[in-house]
Amino acid sequence: MTTLRSVDGFERALARGLPPIVWISGDEPLLVIEAADAVRARARLIGFAERQIIDLGARFDFSLLTEATRSMSLFGERRLVDIRLAGKPSKEFGDALREALPTLGDDCRLLVTGDRLERATTGTAWFGALEPALLWYETPRVDRDALPGWLASRLARQHQTGSPAVLALIADRTEGNLLAAHQ
């Protein structure tokens, strides 16, 4: 398993190829969304033209996940199964992933997104069984003190700047909410 905690490391890993399972987790929805967008863009670039979205709630029928990973595309296209977790991953979900892993082949990849993973999850047998095929990216936390710097780097990417007073004001008004700061 490759575990990454930096944007640069994540981007380098994606450039090397798309592993069978990419898991993106974190406390900041904006960073999770952006990382998932990068995976979807990479998948399209290398020929995964079809995407199936699975919103995984509390009463999810896990046979649907197994079916999604085993069924061939109607047009024989490579497929990205985009799994969106609504909470902590359950043992049933882990077992379904472990069962699906040997059937993935070259025509199917899984993208799992959700909240920051706890040690209780990453230490399970099912999570460990995914390690050989897993790229796990834990998006970095942006502490309140680091928010003005984060805002400055975002503005720099857009060829814009902001004075320290403006950056501090935005940081204060958004109260650490990166989605709001991004807007």
Image (cartoon, grey):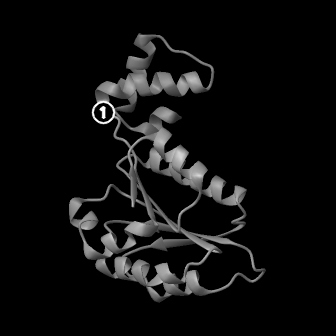
> Where in the figure is residue 36, as x and y percent of width and height?
53, 54
Label 1, secondary structure: give it: loop
State the residue at coordinates (57%, 60%). Answer: 18
> Where in the figure is residue 176, as x and y percent of width and height?
35, 34
Residue 38 in sight from this viewpoint: no
Note whether 61 is above or below 183 in the view shown.
below
Residue 44 in sight from this viewpoint: yes
**Of 127 and 132, which appears nearest the observer?**
132
Q: Is residue 132 left or right of residue 104?
A: left
> Where in the figure is residue 25, as x and y percent of width and height?
39, 55
Q: Is residue 137 left or right of residue 182?
A: left
- Residue 96, located in which quarter of the rendered image? bottom left
Note whether 36 is above or below 109 in the view shown.
above
State the residue at coordinates (58%, 86%). Answer: 70
Note whether 102 is above or below 116 in the view shown.
below
> Where in the figure is residue 138, as x and y percent of width and height?
38, 50
Name the amino acid, label 1: Asp
Report the number of numbered marks. 1
State the residue at coordinates (50%, 85%). Answer: 66
Image quarter in which the N terminus is found? bottom left
Q: Residues within 10 Å of mark 1 (few under 14, many from 20)?
A: few
Residue that extends furthest to the left in the rendered view of this protein: 120
- Residue 57, located in which quarter of the rendered image? bottom left
- Residue 125, located in which quarter of the rendered image? bottom left
Return the residue at label 1.
143
Note whether 117 is above or below 75 in the view shown.
above
State the residue at coordinates (37%, 78%). Answer: 93
